[in-house]
Amino acid sequence: DETFSFKYSPGKLRGNQYKSMMSKEELEEEQRVQREQLAAIFKLMKEKSDTFGEMSEGDMKEQLRLYDI
């Protein structure tokens, strides 16, 4: 009986722990929803550049790396 401990750790480590607990279908659905949410966030940021500032393609790629995409 394996017990998962979610002590403080960097985001990717916690994410990998969650991934190991999901079925393939759940993981695919999670990734699809994550992509949709990030697309909506980046669209809003682009539309509201006066509020959020300009984001280059490099800035977006750097942010996506934080989400393991």
Image (cartoon, grey):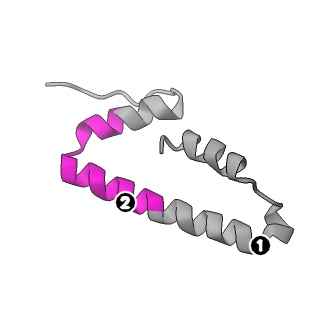
Q: Residue at x 28, y 53 (%)?
A: 28
Query: In this picture, which residue range is highlighted in magenta?
Result: 17-35
Q: Residue at x 27, y 35 (%)?
A: 20
Q: Is residue 56 above or below residue 41?
A: above
Q: Which residue is mark 2?
A: 32
Name the kind of residue labelled 2 in the image.
Arg
* Secondary structure state at the residue bearing disc 1: loop
Q: CA distance from mark 1 to mark 2?
A: 24 Å
Q: Residue at x 43, y 33 (%)?
A: 14
**Neighbour tally class for label 2: few under 14, some 14-19, many 20 plus, Cα within 10 Å:** few
Q: Where is residue 41 shown, x and y percent of the image?
A: 61, 65
* Secondary structure state at the residue bearing disc 2: helix
Q: Is residue 39 above or below residue 28?
A: below
Disc ID at residue 13:
none
Classify residue 46 as left or right of residue 35: right
Name the kind of residue labelled 1 in the image.
Lys
Quarter of the rendering occupied by the N terminus: top left
Q: Which residue is mark 1?
A: 48
Q: Where is residue 50 shown, x and y percent of the image?
A: 86, 70
**Neighbour tally class for label 1: few under 14, some 14-19, many 20 plus, Cα within 10 Å:** few
Magenta region, main secondary structure: helix
Q: Where is residue 18 shown, x and y percent of the image?
A: 34, 39
